[in-house]
Amino acid sequence: MTVVRGSVHRNSYRDSVELMAIAAQLEGLDGVRRAGLVMATPANLAVLAEAGLADAATGDPRPNDLVVALAADDDATATVALERAASLLAAGTGDAGSPADVQVAQTLGEGLAELPDANLVLVSTPGGYATAEAIRALKRGLNVFLFSDNVSVEDEVRLKSMAQRRGLLVMGPDCGTAIVGGVPLGFANAVRRGPIGLVGASGTGIQQVSSLIHGAGGGVSHAFGTGGRDLDERVGGTTMAAAIDLLLADAATSVIVLISKPPAATVAARILAAISRSPKPVVVNFLGGDAADVDAVGAHPAPTFEAAARIAVALSRDPSSALEPPNGAWTSPDEALLARAADAATGLASTQRKIQGLYSGGSLAGEAKVVLRAMLGGERHDRILDLGDDEFTVGRPHPMIDPRLRNEHIVEAASDPTVVALLLDVVLGYGSHPDPASAMAPAIEAAIATAASAGRRLPIVASVCGTDLDPQGLARQEGILAASGAILESSNARAAMFAASIAGVVSDAHTPLVGAAD
Amino acid sequence: MRRTVDDRLVVVAIDEVGGLPGGILVRGPSDLRTIGLAPGMTMAPTVGGWAVPAVGLSIDGGSAVPWSPMLPAAARRAVTAWDPRRTAEARSVAAGLAHVGSLASGRWATDDPWSTTIAAIVRRLVIDLTYDAGGAATRDAVGMIGMGRGLTPAADDVLVGLLAGLDALDHPQRAKIAAAVTAAAPTRTTSVAAATIAHAARGAYSEWLHDVLVASGAPHGAGDPLPAAIARALSFGATSGGDTLVGLFAAMDVAAARAERGARAARGARVAA
Amino acid sequence: MRQNAGRGLMDGVRAINIGLAGFADPIGAAGAPVVSLDWRPPASGDRDLGLALALLADDHADAIGDRIATANANAVERILGSQASLVDVRPAAEVIDILSTRTLLHSGPPIAWPSMCGPVQGAAIGACLFEGWAATANEARALLDAGSVGFAPSHDHGAVGPMAGVVSPSMPVVVVENLAAGNRSYATLNEGLGKVLRFGAYDAAVLERLRWFASTLGPGLSTVLRTGGAIDLKAITAQALQMGDEGHNRNVAATSLFTRLIAPTLATALPPAMAGEILAFLRGNDHFFLNLSMAACKAGLDAASGIDGSTVVTAMSRNGVDFGIRVSGTGPTWYTSPVGVPDGLYFPGYGPDDANPDLGDSAITETFGIGGFAMAAAPAIVRFVGGTPSDAIAFTRSMERITLARNSAYGLPSLGFAGTPTGIDARLVVETGIAPVINTGIAHREAGVGQIGAGIARAPLACFEDAIRAMAERFGVRVAA
């Protein structure tokens, strides 16, 4: 049982730091669940009410009054706490008991004094300062996970050549994720350990492949991020080449997966040359790239992340297995999916032609485009937006952390009569929003309702990139989304196939109306 | 330290604080509380100065120098002249120096409803102001008045910073927001905060805020005045300076986003033409 | 042949996290050791300088980093290895070449007569009177206005002086030899408190004391040293640090130890009246050892100067207008910045408005690792700024963050006899933004009023930033301005 009590101090002034200190002291008392000290403005009273502390502000306080609001286990505790608050307010600043002699390491040198055998530095400072920190780390013989973006390509080349000379690895810049020996770095999913080693230029690509490997019962030895520009001609794939060497030498790794957009030609040649000598099977996912080059060096091409994960898991169980796509091609839906898509397409209007993708993961958006192009051809007006792109994130948090921006887009898309299906990704894992499905569910429900009020149906197809070990929980997130009315697929590639199938059904049904040739 | 006979707010501060709207700067001990001054006291004008009857103190205005709280020309820039890298830099310096738990630090308890709510409203304001959604922005601006901790609740300081930034970049929706918050503030927040908002709405800001705006337009490099200006701003009040910067940075984000939008539109126009 | 990348990584992550604090959580949860830094932009947020600093960081795998690391190790070794010994007291002109002309030495970085602050101008006038170059103060001023007297920083001529630090040819100076490197340094004799030349006073009593120094104290001490032998200053300082001195603002223990050491020879080698006068003077001057301490520090730091590539600070000093530092790798070059008024406690009747900006060569003690750096030895000093004994320890601890070594010869009891933080690295000052702390007296801004308080000053960071820019340029590391 919780009691809510409060006191009002007329015309009482305290600065905010003092108030925070007093609130912290009150919350430190046994039996006090929450304490808030604020001026009794209407806005603050509303916030108190939302926090379940409405009863604390009694006696019609005015904006110039100070309110002490408490939630405590029982009346006696609340009374003691309110008395304590009164005496602290009377005494002025509460003694914060600042631990003045505790020194927190501020520089890399001081950090190394605390952890002398460190072997890795994570850098996520603002980009302007990141190069300097990475240089310091390399100079001290430490590998670097460089999350920061806005690092120039010149700096990237400089860092990577420094690293190469010293036998060190620079993951990044703009490296979103990695897993080293089971330890997640940055935005990573919690996956089982196992024999599959990943190297990827794309953060969400690594997340999707590692999650799907886990989902298929496989496991990951290491996953190295290279940063999005590593396979650029100017950088030359230095990190990818180094990471491939690491995995080749690693006894715990028996299968290697490479994930990237198609590299520059010279870089592709270098990478393919490296894997042509590999005694371990290599799966290559150059999203939208040419499978023949990969075949030519004896590696396994995988057009989608899902294909990469499934081929890798099969190879990890039987290195000689040549897993064929179940339906002729990795971008072809199976019968069951087609049947469900046909179901979902029932009653869609002829005006509904365009697939609208609203993505938080850039590479997942890229994968969706590859699938749509393979199934529907290029001459379409589908709109696949990467809301994590700089264009959308100026002054705003990334949609993986804060779903608000995407929610606005979801609701807006529902009033567009030309949209035939909405395609969404939801990325779980460390660093992501603690409960993205719950944060998105109201928008999904609103979108469905908006379309319905205009006399339309709007299928919303989503996939969740994550695992049952992630802090958010894969099953729980999928459950919340399904309850809100979304159609769940087990991978982003399958979600894209589903949306494309819906679009295909609608377009076939209405072909005579629009008079499309073919 | 408020309320003269004509019901206006007067702020008495020591010289080092720098110019303030409605402020009287005096020479004295660094903490004026040590000579008995306290917030909320009544001041009365006297011949040639002011008096604080409660503590028997008189302030000699004879040698006072007037100072204008209106933005200097150097603080005003077109939207294209707001470098988002400078904003990022300013934000990072402020985050490093600000009191943990305050808005400017970016670090607060996840169950702190005030900071979480204010931060969310600020994000909405940036979007609305980027796309000229004046009605939505005004609703949010009025809605946040009085929210947060402190004698000037944090959101009120944020508003002041936002108004200053919008003033500097000459935002078309500023007048509408300024009028609405001036009208709403007296019943929605403390009298000190309402007075500060009214000053900001008419374009009057503290000198340290001028300094941050001017410094953010200075080139980066040796002798960069920005970090020092940020540090000085943060030393104003307990968290007020930092909260004000949060509003100012939001306005800078708006500038960058509007400039980017303008550039995209121009590119689109060229392609179309 | 390429090395295998990812050195050490595959046997398990041990991470340091710079930036987003949340990134440490999953690492820790996975059982890997992780330390999160309380990172803030280095170099006061100047990105280019921060980058230059990183490029100048120690690294035996690159030419620049290796040269700096080696040079600094060398510099620190010379500082720690210095053996300051008081060998004689001589008239300044006899041992400092430039004083054979009509020249005065002053404290701090170079400054011209018209720009000097009140106390230094007063001291210069006093020195002209003392030397007999002028008969009255007005005559002296005219002489100085006409540019007929040369000026040079003491530091540029092996000498140091507290406050105004004016040294004229006839003044006796202590001769300190660094037995390890063979170099010598000089300092005037300390006049005590009250109306004294170093605060710009030049009345009859001041001049009378200076004459007594030249006629009695100087020759007397010279005889004592020549008879009784040189005195090991390092040993005195080491003991005094365990007796509540910090070697800059509190010197009572060291002065007592010094007096005790010379007393027997004084009593036997000098006429009784002379010995009595000298002992009486020493009894009344708790700060007598300060000038010896300064000369000892100067001797150690000069030995570490001019080591190509070293970023170790070899001098910090103030002339009442500018603060200046020197860095080993650029030898005698000064990097200066305007100097402020110290934060401190004023004698009754005075306040910050009366204070002269910080003044004197005495910050050579901090440069050597004592004074403010040894605050933990002298908790009484922090009273000047309203601090507590734990603040004193915190001052010393924070100086450990900008120094390269600890001087094991100077153990601090309150820190379990850990040595004083020694060898200020200009790179660390700029990287951390922690400015060296300096214990100092506060002079009245008008000549001759004297000391009006004492307190704690911080060296301005701009000097250190300029020094790093200069080092970067020397190494061809481009720093955009």
Image (cartoon, coloured by chain):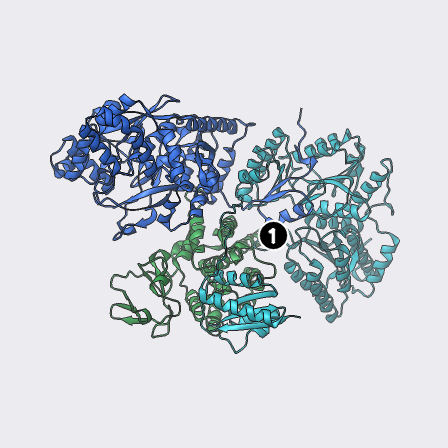
Chain colours: A cyan, B green, C blue
Q: Residue furthest bottom?
A: A59
Quadrant assignment for the C terminus of chain C:
top left
Front residue of A280/A382: it is A280
Quadrant for residue A305, please give it. Answer: top right
Disc 1 element: helix
Check the image and report above or below for C267 versus C138. Answer: above
Q: Residues within 10 Å of mark 1 (few under 14, many from 20)?
A: few
Check the image and report above or below for B152 versus C351. Answer: below
In the image, what residue occupies the spot 41% across and 35% down? C369
Q: Is residue B87 visible?
A: yes
Give the left or right position of residue C110, taking residue C471 as reference: left
Q: Amino acid at mark 1?
A: Glu
Residue C350 picture location, percent across and down: 26, 51
Give the left or right position of residue A278, taking residue B63 as reference: right
Q: Chain of mark 1?
A: A
Check the image and report above or below for A86 versus A260. Answer: below
Check the image and report above or below for A226 versus C217. Answer: below
Q: Is residue B141 visible?
A: no
Residue C461 picture location, percent across and down: 41, 41
How many callouts does the rendering have?
A: 1
Residue B184 picture location, percent across and down: 48, 73
Residue at numbered disc 1: A391
Front residue of C18/C416: it is C416
Quadrant assignment for the N terminus of chain C:
top right
In the image, what residue occupies the spot 11% across and 34% down? C135
Give the left or right position of residue A437, taking residue A113 as reference: right
Quadrant for residue A408, please give it. Answer: bottom right
Residue A416 picture location, percent across and down: 70, 64
